[in-house]
Amino acid sequence: MTPTLRKIILTILAIFFGLSSQAQLEEVTTLTADGPGDTYDLIQSTFNPGNRSLAYEIPDTFHNPPVAHITEVFDNEINKYVFKFDMHLEQDGEIVSNSQDRQRNEIKVHAPSPEKLKAKQGDTLTYEWKFKLDSLFQPSGGFTHFVQFKAVGGQSGPPLLTLSPRKKKSGDFMELIHRGNIEDGEVSGNLRLRSLDLAPFLGKWLAVTCTIHINGSSTEIAVNKDGAYTDFPTPGFMDFEISEVHTGNILMSYSSDDIDTDRNERKGKAFQFIRPKWGIYRSLNDRINLRDETVYFADFVITKKSKPIIIPEPEPVDNTGLFTPNPVIDFIIFDDKFTGYKFEIFNLSGRKVKASTRLKINLSSLSPGAYIVKATKDAVENTFNIIKK
């Protein structure tokens, strides 16, 4: 955080002291490596405390004797302990279904996990984590997923969202893939929201932020307003960003104010919630392009917003000519003179909660309160404050 930004934050803190106690509450869960030993216990205590059902799916027992596939090691690049996920091409298999054509080494939120980790209809959750791929990472023509967002209940088979490298005739790519509802409880084929050259994603620590509001698309809501759509009429939305940890350079960005993020009922089973899985899950159908791989993860944070409570009407802030409206409820629209600027929005703790290059930005996922906006273009920087209702 720059000294200028820190000074402004401290000033606004003084003006709005006590506002956070009135604003929408957040439940924050963190999973951070703390050193070698008891790694599985650490994962279990965070994602599934007090329950025997395991919060990980690991191929340890494919080795004799078993070999730990998730460990904690010290990383000199970010100067902290991180989680090390290993996958062995010849030995490892699929522990869940015992399928011979795939391998899995993942941690997960699932049905026995605490409610604060589950993304149910009408919920808004923000997921943050860091990861690093080897500079020589080898993708294949089959699927490889580093993160999956999957449904429990309803159409729970194909994942809702994945981050996946893929080898194609035209080159190697990092892809953000979405699969939404279609008719009769089925889901669509892969919709590539982003497909970018893989090389910039290799050999460095990357930070990911993904905010998801769970609901159907506006089309679904319009044709079927009964049930959950009556209670939660706002369409599903998502903001996804990958940036370099050390430079802050954004490698991948996707934002939609109208995207299907829930799942329809299927065979009498109603949709319950969306849950994340992190690790390595890959097909073996293109073995010639695979090898032993290691993927590093760090600093998992899941933030679930509670239902908003009534807060006093905040005093409007005068930023005449810069943007409208202020206070903002859903969208903030910047003046055309900011075309080409990069916008970064920070909470009063100095944590970046949103980034965009659009003049119209959806802020509906943010909790009520005061925020700092930094607008930059080349060597020009503007910093001002907003109120989110």
Image: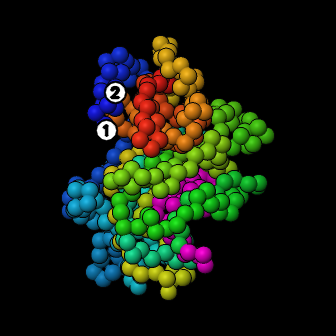
Query: Quadrant location of residue 193?
Result: bottom right
x%, y% of residue 129? 39, 52
Q: Say how the picture is coloured.
A: rainbow
Q: Amino acid at mark 1?
A: Met
Q: Crowding near pointer 2: few (<14 within 10 Å), some, many (20+)?
A: many
From which residue to which does the magenta span run?
144-171
Residue 146 in percent (x, y) is at 46, 63
Q: Tell me, yes or no, whether the highlighted magenta stretch contains residue 151.
A: yes
Relative to 119, 13 lies left or right: left
Vertical order, 148 against 370 (above or below): below
Compare marks 2 and 1 and give the one earlier in the sequence.
1
Q: Residue drawn 48% across and 50% down?
A: 241
| Proximity of marks 2 and 1: CB atoms separated by less than 8 Å | yes
Q: Which residue is mark 2?
A: 9
Outermost residue, right side = 223
Residue 267 in sight here: no
Residue where numbered disc 1 is placed: 1
The image quadrant of residue 65 is: bottom left
Residue 285 part of the magenta-drawn span: no
| Residue occupying the point 73% across, 54% down | 182
